[in-house]
Amino acid sequence: GGACRGLSTTDRGESLSKHDTYVSEYKARDTYLLVSADLKHIPFTVRQHPIDGTPCMFYDKARVEEVATRKHGSLPQAARLQLDTEAEEAKAAEAEAAEAREAVEAGRKHSNLFMAPPLQWWRRLTNRRKQRREQLLRDAHDQRASKWRGSSKAVYFAIVSNASVTVAKFGASAITGSGTMMAEGVHSLADTCNQCLLAYGINQSVKAPDKEHPYGYGPERYVWALISGVGIFFIGSGVSIYHGVMGLLHPPVIQSIPIALGVLGCAFLLEGATFLYALREVRASASRSGMSTMDYVRYGSDPMGVAVLMEDGVAVLGVGIGAACLGLASLTGNPVFDSVGSIVVGTLLGGVAAFLVQKNRDALLGRSIRPEQLSTIMNILLSEPIISSVHDVKATTLGADSIRFKAEIQFNGKVVAERYLLQKKESEEELFWQLKHRVFTPRDMHEVLTMNGAELIDFLGEEVDRVELNIQAALPGIRTHVDLEIV
């Protein structure tokens, strides 16, 4: 008869009997308020439970009513006794539920339905905070390390090299009176100043995020690279062209050409070394990004190495132009060649400056990430069983090694519910037992639903965090800020 005890009121008795002539043992006890001693002399039959096939005892209904009438006086009296019994049981259940709630509020660690979820929430929240702290520490370490690697080292190397060349060129210009040497000196001075601006931008860009700049200071590189490009245009290009035009109007007397050529030779070696170093770093960055060198120069996210490469490339070319113009002026005795060389160098600087200004302007406006990066992220999202669709995708570059990805995602409710149940420590049978034996009032049910609802929302947060970490792991070497919104 034990298997029949879990049935609802409509299932206890007649619904298990093919005829209305038998009463289940549970109903005989629950409805007619009989005990084992009352039932032992009543004829019975054994039938299989219709759900799980377990045997149940069924008693003759007429005899059960006869025994109940003799014991309680009448069937209505038995019904009233049953109501009184149910009221006492409900009262006892309410008292037990109140004790359980008081135990939870007092913080006693009972292993019950009301206490387990908060403990699990706290553990998950602690783990999530720990993961976030570890991620922040890794990002901070990467930011500090990026200050001394890759294109950053090329910038510092170029500062030292160009500062030395600047002093030598101005000295040669003062000795020889060459306009081309003056233009080269101004060019090297502009390069040195601009690379100091780039170095300042690097220092600013690796600062940790704060309340005013939650995504960090990565765009500082573009700001100072843009200022550097403007400086090249006005100082390097403008002064060089101006000096060349003045040389055409008022030709200077060029002296000590061998000294000037010797200085240009030294400058070629130093600036050539800087150019090769910058080229090596740009190629390495392009390889890490999966791009060709030319594509990286045009569309790469790091402006510093490209700026050094372009400036020193023009510097090397300018040294060659300067040497050729000085040689022609010496052979022909015509200083016009020297002035023309100054104008040509200034024009080259203007072209480089315009390119750098446009490149950094696009970056500051928010250039989209590369198609292959976007494809990688979308493949991760669409391969997740819990995600049914992705909408309103926006992905932009924040810095040399930082991007932001924002999208709205729609969850597959059935898959989310299945994963939520799988991750719960309680089995379905245990959860059913807790619901059956610990939920006695509507208030208890309200608490259970509230806690499970809150736990489900917390689980969704964990799933979003997991997907974001998968995206970040798929793009190594890039700080990826992922914002996923649930629709």
Image (tube, rainbow, N blue to C red):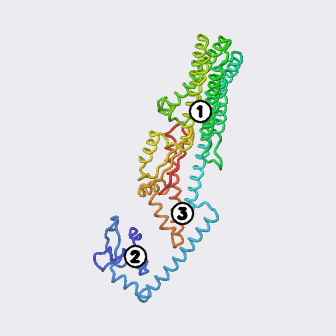
Image position of 189 with respect to 115: above or below: above
The answer to whether one can see residue 150 in this image is no
Q: Earlier in the sequence, mark 3 or mark 1?
A: 1
Going by the numbered disc 3, the residue's amino acid type is: Met
Label 1 CA crowd tier, 10 Å (few <14, some 14–19, many 20+):
many
Q: Secondary structure at mark 3?
A: helix
Instruction: Identify the residue position indicated by label 2 in the image.
Output: 9
Q: Secondary structure at mark 2?
A: helix
Image position of 265 with respect to 157: above or below: above
Q: Earlier in the sequence, mark 2 or mark 1?
A: 2
Label 2 CA crowd tier, 10 Å (few <14, some 14–19, many 20+):
few
**Residue 51 horizontal side relative to residue 428, left or right:** left
- Name the outermost residue toward the left: 18
Q: Earlier in the sequence, mark 2 or mark 3?
A: 2
Which residue is at a point 47% across and 56% down the rendered structure image?
420
Number of the front mark, 3 or 1 = 1
Instruction: Identify the residue position indicated by label 1 in the image.
Output: 304
The one of 254 and 249 positioned closer to us in this rendering: 249
Q: Secondary structure at mark 1?
A: helix
Number of the front mark, 2 or 1 = 1
Image position of 338 with respect to 192: above or below: above
Going by the numbered disc 1, the residue's amino acid type is: Met
Instruction: Identify the residue position indicated by label 3 in the image.
Output: 451
**Residue 256 horizontal side relative to residue 121, left or right:** right
